[in-house]
Image (cartoon, grey):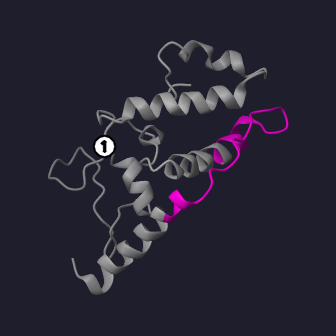
């Protein structure tokens, strides 16, 4: 990689990601009748980014949509690959932060902790509402990804 373009852009984006740790975590959005699930999800995802980074943790690994990590390159025609974009330090996700999430394995040692933490946030957001019963089945395993 050439510092003049790719690594300089990476450094700029990485510095902005690290600044998230200096921000106060946002107030947890509650899931209510006035804040339905589809609208709430976007607020909740943003809240997770800020709250995880403000504690000095990595981004929540369990937010990745798929369990398997998309490989960056290979030769198997049956597999969709996600190479780095030309002149960028990330793939199709569009940012380094998203690549950190989407390229992290669910076998990572921190995944279980992150998953339980996300469950805790979801439980808190639904506490006392009609939505509480929808996450109750995931209580024992503290499975935030499934709830």
Per the image, label 1 sits on a secondary structure element best described as loop
Estimate the x, y position of residue 8 in percent, counting from the top left.
34, 80
Estimate the x, y position of residue 141 in percent, counting from the top left.
47, 16
Q: Does the magenta stretch include residue 30?
A: yes
Estimate the x, y position of residue 2 in percent, counting from the top left.
23, 82
Estimate the x, y position of residue 16 in percent, counting from the top left.
48, 69
* Residue at the image point whose x is 42% and y is 31% from the top: 113
Which portion, as a residue range, is magenta? 19-42
Q: Is residue 34 magenta?
A: yes
Which of these two is toward me, 37 or 104? 104
Which of these two is toward me, 23 or 131? 23
Q: Could you tell me which quadrant the C terminus lies in?
A: top right
Q: Can residue 145 be seen in this view?
A: no
* Left or right: 72 in relation to 145: left
Q: Which residue lies furthest to the right in this view?
A: 34
Which of these two is toward me, 121 or 22? 22
* Residue at the image point whose x is 45% and y is 40% from the top: 65
In this view, 7 is above or below 41? below
In this view, 62 is above or below 87? above
Q: Which residue lies furthest to the left in this view?
A: 75
Q: Residue 88 occupies which quadrant of the picture?
A: bottom left
Total labels: the figure holds 1
Q: State the residue position of label 1.
A: 69
């Amino acid at each position: 990689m050439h510092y003049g373009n790719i690594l300089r852009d990476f450094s700029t984006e990485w510095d902005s990601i690290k600044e998230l740790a200096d921000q106060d975590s946002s107030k947890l959005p509650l899931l209510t009748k006035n804040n339905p699930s589809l609208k709430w999800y976007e607020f909740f995802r943003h809240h997770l980014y800020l709250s995880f980074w403000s504690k000095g943790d990595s981004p929540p690994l369990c937010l990745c949509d798929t369990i398997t990590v998309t490989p960056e390159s290979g030769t198997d025609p049956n597999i969709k690959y996600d190479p780095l974009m030309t002149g960028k330090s990330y793939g199709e996700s569009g940012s380094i932060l998203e690549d950190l999430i989407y390229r992290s394995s669910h076998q990572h040692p921190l995944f279980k902790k992150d998953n339980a933490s996300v469950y805790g946030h979801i439980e808190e957001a639904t506490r006392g509402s009609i939505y509480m019963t929808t996450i109750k089945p995931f209580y024992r395993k503290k499975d935030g990804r499934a709830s």
